[in-house]
Image (cartoon, helix red, strand yellow):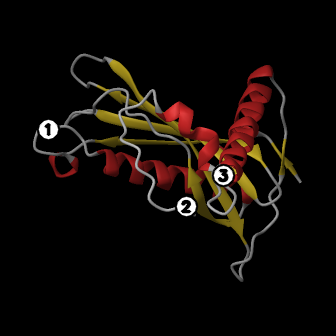
């Protein structure tokens, strides 16, 4: 089966209430992350037709604060597929209802894994790429996954060699006193 990325598109808009805020009237980042996880689940499940779980979350930078009374809109869609996993791209914006100003709050990528009825990883449909933007999103997600895998290998505790990195530490505010030789 082959599916278009648009078949995974989901939009969620929610009014930000005082119960979602911290003491300064700004919305808790954790609340926004919770909504992002929900929409990632919805997009991945819609695309795969399966129950999906979050495998990883790429970096999330909070670019602009969200205030109580603003409308928060999250848009998500599948940008990349593997055998059983999907990378869901999410864009979050806030809108001041009174002024109409729209701010980009953050973007992130969630890796979701499809599960079958027994909880085992399940195959996902192929992704149809029909525009240059689809290709860009796919290749970007693929690159992020490859970079993550390379970083995991490079810093694996069993094979990491601190000697290779000691010179680079001189540029940083660290006091180096290695007491163990393991």
Q: Is residue 167 left or right of residue 49?
A: left
Percent position of residue 2, x then y: 87, 48
Q: Nearer the viewer, mark 1 or mark 3?
A: 3
Identify the image quadrant of residue 71. top left
What residue is disc 1 on?
Answer: 25
Outermost residue, right side: 1
Q: Element at badge 1? A: loop
Q: CA distance from mark 1 to mark 3?
A: 38 Å
Residue 118 lies, in percent from the top left, at 71, 83
The residue labelled by disc 2 is: 181
Whether pointer 3 and pointer 2 mark residues with C-beta atoms closer than 8 Å, the reply is no
Label 1 vs 2, first from the N-terminus:
1
SS label for mark 3? helix
The residue pinned by badge 3 equals: 152
Please state, as top left, top right, bottom left or bottom right, where the C terminus lies in the image. bottom right
Is 1 situated left or right of 134 in this image? right
How far, Cα to Cα, is label 1 from label 2? 50 Å
Image location of residue 9, percent across then percent down: 63, 41
Say which of 125 and 15 sits in front: 125
Of tags 3 and 2, the one toward the viewer is 2
* Viewer-side label of 1, 2: 2
Cα gap from disc 3 to disc 2, whole angstroms: 22 Å
Q: Residues within 10 Å of mark 1 (few under 14, many from 20)?
A: some
């Amino acid at each position: 089966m082959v599916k278009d990325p648009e078949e995974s598109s989901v939009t969620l808009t929610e009014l930000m209430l005082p119960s979602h805020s911290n003491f300064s009237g700004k919305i808790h980042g954790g609340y926004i992350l919770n909504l992002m996880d929900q929409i990632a689940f919805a997009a991945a499940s819609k695309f795969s037709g399966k129950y999906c779980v979050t495998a990883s979350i790429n970096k999330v930078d909070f670019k602009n604060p969200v205030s109580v009374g603003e409308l928060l809109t999250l848009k998500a869609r599948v940008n990349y597929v593997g055998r059983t996993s999907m990378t869901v791209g999410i864009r979050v914006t806030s809108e001041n209802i009174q002024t109409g100003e729209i701010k980009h709050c953050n973007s992130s990528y969630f890796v979701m894994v499809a599960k079958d009825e027994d909880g085992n990883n399940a195959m996902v449909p192929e992704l149809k790429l029909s525009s240059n933007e689809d290709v860009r999103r796919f290749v970007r997600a693929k690159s992020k996954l490859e970079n993550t895998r390379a970083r995991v290998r490079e810093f694996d505790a069993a094979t990491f060699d601190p000697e290779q990195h000691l010179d680079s530490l001189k540029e940083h505010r660290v006091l180096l006193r290695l007491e163990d030789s393991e």
